[in-house]
């Protein structure tokens, strides 16, 4: 019996070590540095996701496939989280989007026929980055970045409303960028919110 317990104990230790090592690989023990940076104005094509973050991947896949069918590939991706912390997960709105910089007029016209095209305003922001390793980075990164960003925003004394994550082209990405725009209410993003209206 003692030998079996030692084996079980060894397996548990190995599993814990593997989990800790994977967390370290993702950057879980690294320090997140917050700075001030301007979020640059840009036009984006918007898709929508309503519900918990855990199911966001399915919406991204469907959105990306629809964009490819209309000639936009690859997607220079970003997401806007429109609702405040504490919102019911079942009703939480996430605008998934692709930056349209460099996209030709013909492709924009095809996209506009089926999706909302929104203009995001330039804004000062508190900013942080987190290394992108794999899909798990989307879950670890926010837990590291947002507490630091929220603290910096509170210190600034300026109002915050939404949060923005910039991913870039996923096959080329090495970091996730986090922005909390300062001094803007959610009303500055009404064209993004319009994508969630019935019939949009």
Image (cartoon, rainbow, N blue to C red):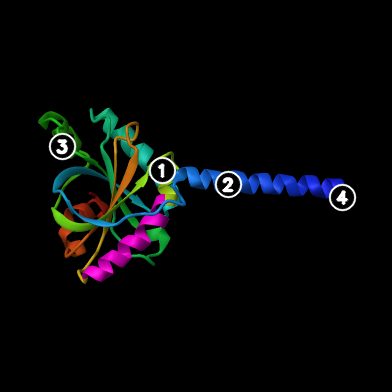
**Helix, strand or loop at disc 3?**
loop
**Chain-order first, disc 4 or disc 1:** 4
The answer to which of 119 and 23 lies nearer the viewer is 23
Name the residue beneath numbered marker 3.
Answer: 101
Name the residue beneath numbered marker 4.
Answer: 2
Q: Image point 46% across, 44% down: which residue?
A: 26
**Chain-order first, disc 3 or disc 2:** 2
Name the residue beneath numbered marker 2.
Answer: 19
| Residue furthest to the right | 1
Label 2, label 4: how far apart the Cα atoms are: 26 Å
Circle 3/circle 4 CB separation < 8 Å? no
> Does the stretch in magenta take in 134?
no
**Chain-order first, disc 2 or disc 1:** 2
**Helix, strand or loop at disc 2?**
helix
| Number of numbered discs visible in the structure rendering | 4
Q: Which range is magenta?
A: 141-156
Name the residue beneath numbered marker 1.
Answer: 57
69 to 196, vertically: above or below: above
The answer to which of 180 and 115 lies nearer the viewer is 180
């Amino acid at each position: 019996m003692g030998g079996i317990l030692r084996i079980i104990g060894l397996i548990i230790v190995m599993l814990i070590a593997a989990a800790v090592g994977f967390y370290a690989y993702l950057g879980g023990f690294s320090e997140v540095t917050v700075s001030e940076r301007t979020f640059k104005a840009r036009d984006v094509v918007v898709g929508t996701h309503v519900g918990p973050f855990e199911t966001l991947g399915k919406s991204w896949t469907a959105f990306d496939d629809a964009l490819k069918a209309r000639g936009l590939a690859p997607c220079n991706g970003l997401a806007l989280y429109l609702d405040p912390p504490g919102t019911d997960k079942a009703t939480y709105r996430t605008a998934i989007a692709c930056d349209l910089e460099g996209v030709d007029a013909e492709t924009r016209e095809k996209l506009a026929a089926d999706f909302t095209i929104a203009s995001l305003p330039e804004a000062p922001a508190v900013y942080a980055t987190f290394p992108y390793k794999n899909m798990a980075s989307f879950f670890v990164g926010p837990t590291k970045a947002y507490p630091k960003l929220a603290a910096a925003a509170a210190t600034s004394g300026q109002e915050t409303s939404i949060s923005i994550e910039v991913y870039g082209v996923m096959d080329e990405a090495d970091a996730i960028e986090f922005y909390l725009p300062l001094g803007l209410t959610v009303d500055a993003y009404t064209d993004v919110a319009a994508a969630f209206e019935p019939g949009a």
